[in-house]
Amino acid sequence: MNTADKISELEKKAKAIRNSILDTIVCANKGHIGGSFSCTDVLVALYYGGFLRYEVSDPENSDRDRLILSKGHSCAALYSVLADLGFISHDKLKEFCQDGTDLGGHPDRSIPGIEADTGSLGHGLGIGAGLALSAKLNKKDFMTVVLLGDGECYEGSVWEAANFASHYKLNNLTAIVDRNGQCVTDFIQECNDLEPFADKWKAFGWEVRNINGHSFKDLLGVFSDFRSRDSQKPLMIIADTVKGKGVSFMERKIPWHHSVPKGKDLETARGELKT
């Protein structure tokens, strides 16, 4: 398959995953739709672009790559990917955030394909750094990928882990920041500006790459060597994204951090995500 055809297939898959996210959140009448939509393309590129190593039939395979969704509140996106791949059933998505389910509003390790309980923001990068160090010590070649939110990067524990990863030369660790520019109550630059963001990571000893997080051309390019880089530095990918991406009235709108479309809004969302 040539690159253009591959990008076209990934774009179709991303739209299907956003539809699944929408259905999951509407069914539950709760969920973080804006942040789930903003990181969808990143997850689709990783899982369907041929970069992550995983086995649906053996989710605990010791040679698998580890993906940690540190911004765990966006788990509807990851659940939808796991259901599409067959780690869990599509019917199980109907249990999302219902009483007694393990498919809660944040990831749980009891779910096949989930590596860590996350959602208490700031913990995922530390877990990922520990996994990457264990791989080095045990001479294993699996990669660890951690997906963070930019609002999450207010947490001091993120920067402790960043320093740790650089010190131990964890070039088998890739972190991706879903840089949608918003947190729960405001825009990042208004709430607590993180700039110069890339320079901060460089100062902590990371290789830094900036991309458009909704461009599959960019995503395919940035992940093309993440398993074979010459650098001894951990890799930080800053993916510029749009919160609520894919549904016009949600994009960059603060209320869609945790709102559920109903009535005409739901009709519009379904129409814009129609495959």
Image: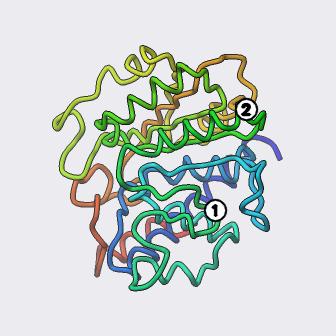
How far across and how far down the image is residue 156, in percent?
Answer: 31, 33
Of the pair 73 and 25, the residue shown nearer to us: 73
Say if 105 sits above or below 65 in the image: below
- Residue at image point 43% right, 72% down: 104
**Badge 2: how crowded within 10 Å, few (<14), some, or many (20+)?**
some
Nearer to the camera, 117 or 266 = 117
On the image, the x and y values in percent for residue 133 come to: 63, 33
The disc label shown at residue 113, or none: 1
Q: Please tell me whether mark 1 or mark 2 is closer to you in this view.
A: 1
User: Which secondary structure, mark 1?
Assistant: loop
Q: Is residue 165 left or right of residue 149?
A: right
Q: Position of residue 227 (x, y in %)?
A: 73, 32
Q: To which quarter of the image does residue 96 belong? A: bottom left
Residue beneath disc 2 = 227
Please name the residue shown 37% across and 43% down the image.
Answer: 122
Q: Residue at x 24, y 52 (%)?
A: 184
Which residue type does callout 2 highlight? Answer: Arg
Sequence-first disc among 1 and 2: 1
Q: CA distance from mark 1 to mark 2?
A: 20 Å
